[in-house]
Amino acid sequence: MSDAPALTFSDDQAEAWDRLAELLRSSGIELDDGLLQPPPSDADKVLAVIGKAGSGKTLLLAELTRALKEAGVQIVGGDWEGRRKKDARTLSILAPTNKAASVLRGRGVPATTIHRILYTPVYDPQFEKVAEWLAGSADRPEVEGLSEEALDRAFASYQTHGSVPAALAAAGLKGSDFITGWKRREDPLDIGFVDESSMLDQRALDDLKEIFPTLVLFGDPAQLPPVQAGGDGMVFETLPENRRLTLTRIHRQADDNPILDLAHALADPDVDFYRFEKLVEEAASRDPRVVMAGRVEADLMARSPVLVWRNATRIRLIHAFRRAYDAPEAALLPGEPLICDGIELPLKHRKRRIELEARGLIKGAQAIYLGPGKRGGFSRLHLMGAPEPQISVASIVKIEQEGEEEPFIPFAAHMGAVFLHGAAVTIHKAQGSQWDTVQVFAPDIEIAARMGRVEAGQPLWKRLAYVAITRAERELRWVVRNRLGRPEEALGVADLGAQPGALSLASEDEG
């Protein structure tokens, strides 16, 4: 066996480590002695590490990242990239959404989004000099329009956050000052680790294979396949069996994890919905991290949506949330949550679309409404999980109406980013995200159980329940009644705080 890390791996993790070390060795990287060689010209390898929640996928990803960095492999993230040496080996850790990437970053893994790697910013040459200085590859520059004090602020910010865009923002610049455009990455990278790969479709995988000759997909086979997959399942399921490494042992915290226990109880064929709900009740009686809730709590919906199966339930809960906060029909209150439903821009604004997507404003992105922008139709937003979360963007906000074909639109630009309300979301759209506390609307899952639908050989209700409850990091609230508790505090944005390096790349000044 190769020299695995000092921490104790389970047998299946150790076997996966050996297979991945072999994959990397065939790509010219020796983890044992840090020997780096140019990749073979025929390198084109995809391997998947799959396992259910708690099986140790993230631990394995984190340890491989650490070992590769110690071996001298350069980490390429979503930040400014300096000139690379000719034979430098590179690694990128990717996730489909900013929220999924932020979960990894919270565990010390320098992850970014797939979009942010596919598209890279073009810097103004003057400010590229600043970036090179901050990264330690050039002397302190003299830049017209930037005082010595502004450069000092940029340097201090970079030492704290390690982000060139954040540092330039700390110097008083807007993104449009130093980023002149965006382009699709032309030069290939090297190795890509992709977390939450159950969310990938074949097109996304093909895009990644164009850039990374060596790809490792980390995914959970018990989650729901992408809606856009058209019934084809998850991309890692199409790989040959010898290209799939399965982690089977479940790793728990020292004091166990009742949420993971419930998730894995769903694998028992003898557990039907009513037996499972009894297990939830029993877990709640022993552990405060599981709660049998008689109502949805409006206070929690502002930052972590209620997870539902049916659209009708989602729309009904959203309207109940807005009534509870006395939200006006014709406007949004600061603090209301939104979900990006896509970007509607003409082809001539392709640059703008790429810019927004690279910043993390992609379909499914979660945002908090901060207030109106300077111009009509613009909204100031906080993108949840984004390294530079503050943006202002032309917005089309749709408040869907129950039983009506057309949504109510309180305000809108002619074109821009389209948003739905985010106080409640479908379980499908929640994949890849995690929240401290999650409310699962159990009556919806009961309806799925009564319908008897099966998906990929598994009862649909079990897949729904599994995905929903594994979104909870600390507390699971299993809501059993269709009731809403009124909020205890007014809606606001004070909890979001002042974000370091907040940028405005929305081009309000550009029109």
Image (cartoon, rainbow, N blue to C red):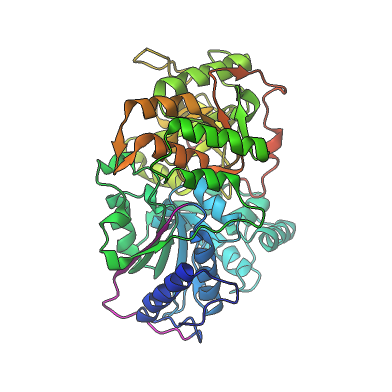
Magenta stretch mostly in which secondary structure? loop
Name the residue nearer the viewer: 49 or 274.
274
- The residue shown at (28%, 64%) is 241
Residue 403's x, y, as percent? Answer: 37, 12
- The residue shown at (48%, 35%) is 276
439 in relation to 408, above or below = below
- The residue shown at (65%, 26%) is 299
Image-based side of 317 in relation to 45, left or right: right
Image quadrant where residue 451 sits: top left
The residue at the far front in this view is 270
Residue stretch rendered in magenta on the structure: 35-52
Would residue 413 be visible to someone looking at this image?
no
Total tally of numbered discs in the picture: 0
Image quadrant where residue 266 sits: top left
Residue 59's x, y, as percent? Answer: 54, 63
Q: Is residue 37 magenta?
A: yes
Residue 262's x, y, as percent? Answer: 52, 43
Image-based side of 282 in relation to 2, left or right: right
Quarter of the picture containing the N terminus is: bottom left
Residue 420's x, y, as percent? Answer: 46, 27
Name the residue nearer the viewer: 228 or 380.
228
Q: Is residue 264 magenta?
A: no
341 in relation to 404, above or below = below
Name the residue nearer the viewer: 322 or 3.
3
300 in relation to 124, above or below = above
Image-based side of 7 in relation to 29, left or right: right
Would residue 252 be visible to someone looking at this image?
yes
- The residue shown at (31%, 62%) is 209
426 in relation to 209, above or below = above
